[in-house]
Image: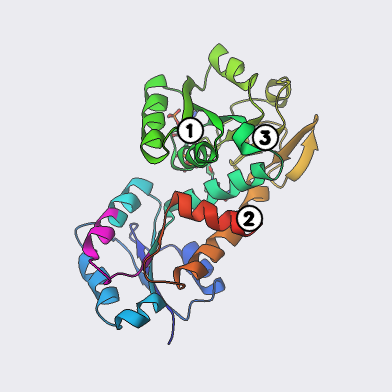
Amino acid sequence: MKTILIQLDTDPQPSSFDRVVAVDAGVDELFSYGGVTPENVEPLVHGAMFTRGPADLKNTALFIGGSNVAAGEAVLEKVLRTFFGPMRVSVMMDSNGSNTTAAAAVLAASKHLDLAATEALVLGGTGPVGLRAAQILASQGAEVHVASRSLERAEQACATIVRNVEGAKLTACTSEGDGLQEALGRVQLVIAAGAAGVQFFDADGWQAADSLKVAIDLNAVPPVGLGGIEVTDKGVEHAGVTCYGAIGVGGTKMKVHRAAIAKLFESNSLVLDTAAIYEIATSLG
Ligand SMILES: NC(=O)c1ccc[n+]([C@@H]2O[C@H](COP(=O)([O-])OP(=O)(O)OC[C@H]3O[C@@H](n4cnc5c(N)ncnc54)[C@H](OP(=O)(O)O)[C@@H]3O)[C@@H](O)[C@H]2O)c1
């Protein structure tokens, strides 16, 4: 039986990026819908649930994407409420690449550090990518400093993570001023996940941190988030610190995305969210 991926995109035009990845992941048929909202998604989900018999439902899956991560999360919630009993298909949520990018970044760090014994700083920790990277790190036992320009927003991000990761070791901090320099001075890992074109430190700034072992910058738009890191760096040493740039992480992100799409067709009951996508990433080695 042919595999069918139903792309539910919250943007008016379904993402061509996500369509290319679906094809490269080997799906036989791709149905793409744009402008998907919690209010109009139910008939699309029913179309997936009620067409093939229970034994064949694993050949149909849903992918939720789009540039607005909160909108994608709302659609996922409605999709999960639409399923009942065995009448369900597997679903993956990766709006704006948030889950696959965060998973790829943490996977890169895990190649050099024992995450359970790591203290990490996530800059831009309130954004979709940063919050997920912080969540995955916390789930692996790392102690995580979550940074934002606003301490209140950093605290909110920590509260969100604690709801998902029991016992998470988190500290909220500001991404400006002395507090930031102090946090950087304590950690072995920094992940810069600020908005495109936002620089947190120049090269001298982050290289002054003695304890730092791994630095990952996810911003590809100049100026990069951590000055001196090249976007193509992939495990390259600068001043004794192992560094990754946005493109360096991006190759792994693409592999994780393709592997997650392929995984959807292994059963009809998978929900590929942040934690599940990180698990898939680790299985890639
Ligand atoms: N390599 C890849 O494959 C890949 C894939 C997807 C995304 N990305 C990149 O990953 C990064 C994070 O993505 P995202 O979607 O999570 O980003 P985002 O939502 O645009 O921004 C993340 C955070 O950056 C902070 N920020 C915004 N403007 C700032 C400024 N002027 N100064 C300091 N902080 C500022 C904000 O936190 P506060 O307001 O709380 O301070 C915001 O929550 C981006 O650079 C994106 O381009 C890379």
Q: Which residues are magenta?
A: 77-90
- Percent x, y of residue 284: 63, 59
Q: Which residue is mark 3?
A: 215
- Percent x, y of residue 122: 54, 32
Q: Residue at x 53, y 46 (%)?
A: 102
Q: Residue at x 44, y 42 (%)?
A: 128
**Foreground residue among 186 and 243:** 186
Q: 278 left or right of 62?
A: right
Q: Which residue is mark 1?
A: 125
Q: Mark 1 or 3 closer to N-term? A: 1
Q: Mark 2 or 3 closer to N-term? A: 3
Label 3 crowd (10 A; few <14 / some 14-19 / many >=20):
many
- Label 1 to label 3, Cα distance in Å? 15 Å
Above or below, 47 relative to 190: below
Amino acid type shown at disc 3: Ala
Q: Magenta segment: does it hold 228?
A: no
Q: Which residue is mark 2?
A: 252
**Foreground residue among 75 and 60:** 60
**Foreground residue among 133 and 227:** 133
Amino acid type shown at disc 2: Thr
Query: Which structural element holds mark 2?
Result: helix
- Label 1 to label 2, Cα distance in Å? 21 Å
